[in-house]
Amino acid sequence: MAEAEQDHDGPLWKLSQQAHEDSTRWFPNYAGDLVHMTLALCGEAGELANLVKKIQRGDLDIKDAETRYKVMMETTDVQTYVLAIAGLIGLDLDKSVQHIRGQNEARFGKDKKDA
C-alpha cells in the first residue's frame, strides 16, 4: 500500500499528523520512539479495559455521567495514541481502514456463515 505523499489528504491523515506533531512538542524525548508510543497505547487501552471490567461486574454504571466521562477520556486517549503512531510511521488511516474493511467483508460479510 505504498502511496505518494500527495495522496494523503483524508481527515484521519490530518489528525494523525496533528497528533504526532502534538506528541513531538509535548514529549520530545519519546514521540519519535515507536516502542514507547506503542507501550503508552497499551497502557491507555488497559485503563479503558479496567473501566469496562468494572462496568461489567457492576461496580460502575455506564449510565452514570462520571463513569461515561471516564470511559470517554480513556477511549480518546487510546485514539490519540493510535493517531500519533500513525503519524509517526506515516500511515494513512483513511486508506488502511478502507483496506481492512474490504478484507473483513470478504472474510465475515453477509455471504459468510456465522462461525
Image (cartoon, grey):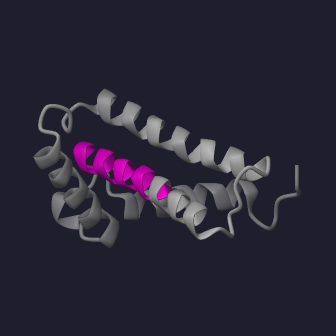
Above or below 37: residue 104: below
18 or 40: nearer the viewer:
40
The residue lying at 26 percent from left, 43 percent from top is: 89
Name of the residue lying farthest toward the top = 35
Question: What secondary structure do most residues of the magenta stretch adopt?
Answer: helix
Q: Position of residue 57 (x, y in %)?
A: 79, 46
Q: How many marks?
A: 0
86 or 47: nearer the viewer:
47
Residue 51 relative to residue 88: left or right: right
The residue lying at 40 percent from left, 52 percent from top is: 77
87 or 40: nearer the viewer:
40
- Dividing the picture into quarters, in which one does residue 7 lie? bottom left
* Residue range (magenta): 75-90
- Dividing the picture into quarters, in which one does residue 35 lie? top left
- Dividing the picture into quarters, in which one does residue 71 lie? bottom right
Residue 40 relative to residue 105: left or right: left
Q: Position of residue 14 (x, y in %)?
A: 24, 66
Based on the picture, tell me whether residue 97 belongs to the magenta stretch: no
Based on the picture, tell me whether residue 79 belongs to the magenta stretch: yes
The residue lying at 15 percent from left, 46 percent from top is: 26
Q: Position of residue 88 (x, y in %)?
A: 23, 44
Q: Position of residue 17 (x, y in %)?
A: 21, 58
